[in-house]
Image: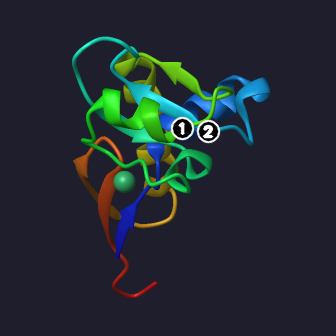
């Protein structure tokens, strides 16, 4: 089984900041600087924003209430390890392939 967490960095930010839930949210470069969108929330996707889009283009598409945050890879890594640990309670073999993806061996389950 392949597990891929959707909008993972944005989901962690919305989990940890309740006021940001239900709002367009971009994890990535600061507006006005060079760089790209790392991840955006579903609410931001609706405006056509996606991962790897230049932040300048995302800012043009998104409304004023959008939340922009810099990535916190240490925190995302901690959440990822916790999720991998939980997956390990479901299947005997869990093979992480990235911070938000894993393969589970579900043979015999
Ligand atoms: Mg993913």
Mark closest to the chain's N terminus, 2 or 1: 2
Q: Residue furthest bottom?
A: 108
Q: Which mark is residue 24?
A: 2
Label 2, secondary structure: give it.
loop
Q: Which residue reaches farthest right? A: 19
Q: Is residue 13 above or below residue 106?
A: above
Q: Nearer the viewer, residue 29 or 92?
A: 29
Marks 2 and 1, Cα distance to the nearest angstrom? 8 Å
Seen in the image, is 66 located left or right of residue 78?
right
Circle 2 crowding by C-alpha within 10 Å: few under 14, some 14–19, many from 20: many
Which mark lies nearer to you, 2 or 1?
A: 1
Of the pair 97 and 52, the residue shown nearer to us: 52
| Callout 2 touching callout 1 (CB < 8 Å) | yes
Position of the N terminus by quadrant: bottom left
Residue that appears at 68% across and 27% down = 65
Ligand 1 visible in quadrant: bottom left
- To which residue does mark 1 refer? 62
In the displayed structure, 1 sits above or below 58; it is: below
Does the closest atom of ligand 1 sit within 8 Å of the Cβ of label 2? Answer: no
Residue 30 percent across, percent down from the top left? 38, 14
Question: For disc 1, does the CB lie below 8 Å from ligand 1?
Answer: no
| Left or right of 78 on screen, residue 2 | left
Label 1, residues with CA under 10 Å away: few <14, some 14-19, many ≥20: many
Could you tell me which residue is drawn at 34 percent across and 85 percent down? 107
**Res. 81 in view:** no
């Amino acid at each position: 089984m392949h597990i891929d967490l959707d909008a993972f960095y944005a989901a962690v930010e919305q989990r940890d900041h309740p006021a940001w839930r239900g709002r367009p949210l971009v994890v990535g470069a600061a507006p006005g600087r060079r760089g790209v969108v790392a991840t955006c929330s579903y609410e931001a996707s609706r405006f056509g924003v996606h991962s790897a889009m230049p932040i300048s283009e995302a800012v043009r598409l998104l409304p004023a209430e959008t939340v922009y945050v810099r990535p916190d890879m240490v925190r995302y890594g901690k959440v990822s390890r916790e999720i991998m640990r939980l997956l390990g309670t479901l299947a005997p073999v869990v093979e992480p392939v990235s911070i938000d993806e894993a393969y589970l061996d579900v043979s015999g389950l």
